[in-house]
Amino acid sequence: MNIQNTISALERKGYTARFFETGAEAVAYLERAIEGKVIGFGGSWTLYALKLHEVLGRKNTVIDPDYPDDGREFEEVALDTVRTQHYMLSANAMSEDGVIVNLDGHCNRIAGSVFGHEKIWYVIGTNKIVPSLEDAIWRTRNVAAPKNARFLKRKTPCAVKGDRCYDCSSPDRICSGLLINLQKTGSAEVEVILINEELGY
Ligand code: SF4
């Protein structure tokens, strides 16, 4: 993979793209870049690993449905993220030519990633970058989702076996909507932060 080619491809698709060698450098940039905003988070192990809730929460208001305030339900908080000023998430996979793929259960994350914000941020480790769109869809369904299901202790075949997607009919299924971003969507500014580390699933 030539990261400069990927950055150029993202820029041709309308994104702003930046590359950082380490998560610490990326976090320091984001801390400088975002201040005084309400930021909705789409569930992401990458954001958690980088402690972005904590760092960005110092100068902004972070709303994360996975960490609702006392007494609030996931759905209620997820609805609050739909119209936040900024929205931040990762990707389940991205092709080398800049097509971003995400799979979601409740679909608040993929909804938040396309509309309703003045700025959207993707934070993506280079472990998520694969050669083609087909590879990105495959990775999303057969690597990211099973790992997530296993971590969440879901009663699904992929969580038990951990090897691939079984397109299950389990009540515990975590996959409903698959979003393929062929290019930047809508009028919002969208910035893609690429980090040369293994981050998230
Ligand atoms: S459809 Fe079922 S088996 Fe496939 S990844 Fe989703 S939860 Fe796992």
Image (spheres, helix red, strand yellow):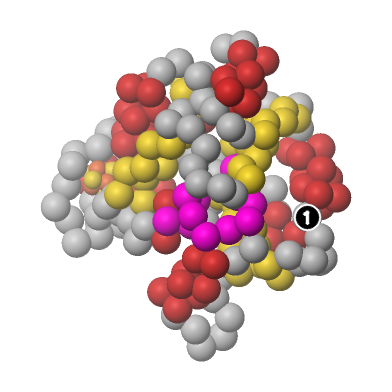
Between 23 and 63, the one nearer to me in the picture: 63
Q: Position of residue 113 (x, y in %)?
A: 49, 51
For the residue pair 185 and 122, the one nearer the viewer reads as: 185
Residue that appears at 77% across and 47% down:
30
Circle 1: element type = loop
Residue 174 image offset from top left, x and y in percent: 31, 54
| Left or right of 22 in this view: 16 | left
Residue at 54% over, 67% down: 83
Q: Amino acid at mark 1?
A: Ile
One can see residue 43 in this view = no
Residue, disc 1: 34
> Residue 167's spot in the image, x, y percent?
18, 42
In the figure, is residue 127 to the left or right of 137?
right
Q: Which of the two residues, 168 or 72, is positioned nearer the viewer here?
A: 72
User: Cβ(mark 1) to ligand 1 < 8 Å?
Assistant: no
Quarter of the view holding residue 84: bottom right
Q: Nearer the viewer, residue 160 or 16?
A: 16
Q: Which stretch did the figure color magenta?
A: 111-123
48 is within the stretch colored magenta: no
18 sits left or right of 131 in the view? right
**Residue 118: x %, y % from top left:** 63, 56
Rendered residue at 79%/66% (across/down): 36
Compared across the picture, whether 119 is left or right of 136 comes to right
Identified at 14% across, 52% down, the residue is: 169
Ligand 1 lies in quarter: top left
Determine crowd level at label 1: few under 14, some 14-19, many 20+ residues with C-alpha closer than 10 A.
some
Relative to 10, say whether 76 is above or below.
below
Q: Is residue 194 above or below residue 177?
A: above
Magenta-span inclusion, residue 112: yes
